Image (cartoon, rainbow, N blue to C red):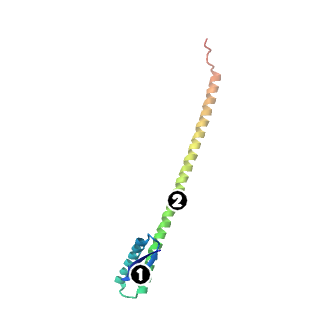
Amino acid sequence: MAQVTVTIDGKAYRMACEAGQEQHLETLAGRFDQYVGHLKSQFGEIGDLRITVMAGIMIMDELAELDRRVKNLQNEIDGLRASGEGAAQDKARNEALMVSAVEELTARLQDMTAKLSARHPEPAQG
């Protein structure tokens, strides 16, 4: 297990993480430190614990909004997939109807040709 030291609100925290995740943890801590710094600039010194809780709530609010957006996008994707599948089914059904109509027309033309041939036989060549 790797160890990394991050700084939040001017205080160093030694943390463990999986090997190779040190940079990621430092980046996350840096982003969290920005939230804390923003809140301190807004509210002044109201206590480390209160600032930390407020920063955590801000992050959870943003996460909830992102979750909502992801769900909306997933619903849109599902709708597009369903309409695409519906369009493919419509196309297949239309093609089947067209084939059926052509087959019926061909049968009628063959029947008419047979009737006409029976009424007007071809003269024998000889």
Q: Residue furthest left?
A: 41
Name the residue at the front extreme.
1
* Residue 59 picture location, percent across and down: 44, 76
Looking at the image, residue 120 lies above or below residue 91: above
Residue 12 position within the rendered picture, expressed as x and y whole percent measured from the top left: 39, 82
* Res. 82 image quadrant: bottom right
Q: Is residue 107 above or below residue 86?
A: above
Query: Quadrant of the rendered structure where residue 97 is?
Result: top right
Q: Nearer the viewer, mark 1 or mark 2?
A: 1
Give the Cα separation between the discs numbered 1 and 2. Answer: 47 Å
Marking on residue 51 = none
Give coordinates of residue 111: x percent, y percent. 64, 30
Q: Residue at x 58, y 37 (%)?
A: 102
> Could you tell me which quadrant the C terminus lies in?
top right
Circle 1 residues within 10 Å: few <14, some 14–19, many ≥20 = few
Q: Residue at x 41, y 81 (%)?
A: 13
- Residue at screen point 65% across, 23% down: 118
Towards the viewer: 93 or 19: 19
Q: Which residue is farthest top?
A: 126
Where disc 2 sits, the SS reads helix
Residue placed most toward the observer, 25 or 123: 25
Secondary element at image label 1: strand
Q: Position of residue 4 (x, y in %)?
A: 41, 76
Kind of residue at disc 1: Tyr
Circle 2 Cα neighbour tier, 10 Å, few/some/many (<14 / 14–19 / ≥20) = few
In the displayed structure, would residue 108 be above or below residue 63? above
Q: Which residue type does callout 2 highlight? A: Gly
Q: Indicate which disc, 1 or 2, sits on the residue closer to the N terminus.
A: 1
What residue did someone put label 2 on?
Answer: 79
Q: Which mark is residue 13?
A: 1
Whether tag 1 and tag 2 are in contact, CB under 8 A, the answer is no
